[in-house]
Amino acid sequence: AYPNPFTERFVVQFNQFQENNIQIRLSDVAGKTVVSKDFGKKRSGLHYLEVDVPSVAPGLYIFTLASGESVVTRRLSKM
């Protein structure tokens, strides 16, 4: 996900090898989900998703991308 740190939105770039439902979750460091978005089914290939989160307070967050059985987790900071 980039940019990191972000201000009001960030972009997720990912490549998947088969069609799957895409879900994105942003959690605070205590584990509470602050944003959860379902992007529906995406075909195989390279994708860019823009995630708008203007109401999220500045701080450190855990970003999770779920695609089928694959899950990727990264840290993100909001300024």
Image: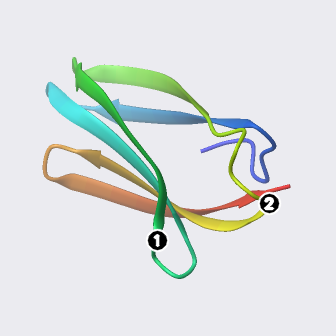
Residue at 22 percent of width and 17 percent of height: 43
Residue 7 sits in quarter: top right
Q: Is residue 2 left or right of residue 38?
A: right
**Image position, residue 62 (x, y; %):** 53, 66
What residue is pinned by disc 1?
Answer: 32
Give the residue at the far front of this rendering: 55
**Image position, residue 11 (x, y; %):** 61, 33
Residue 47 sits in quarter: top left
Q: State which quarter of the image contains the N terminus.
A: top right
Badge 2 marks a residue whose secondary structure is loop
| Mark sitting on residue 40 | none
Disc 2 crowd rating (10 Å Cα; few below 14, some 14-19, many 20+) is: some
Residue 50 sits in quarter: top right
Depth order, front residue of 20/33: 33
What residue is pinned by disc 2?
Answer: 58
Q: CA distance from mark 1 to mark 2?
A: 15 Å
Depth order, front residue of 38/50: 38
Badge 1 marks a residue whose secondary structure is loop
Residue at 15 percent of width and 43 percent of height: 68
32, above or below 57, in the image: below
Residue at 51 percent of width and 33 percent of height: 13
Q: State which quarter of the image contains the C terminus.
A: bottom right
Q: Is residue 39 left or right of residue 52?
A: left
Depth order, front residue of 29/4: 29
Amino acid under disc 2: Pro
Amino acid under disc 1: Lys
Q: Earlier in the sequence, mark 1 or mark 2?
A: 1
Give the residue at the far bottom of this rendering: 30
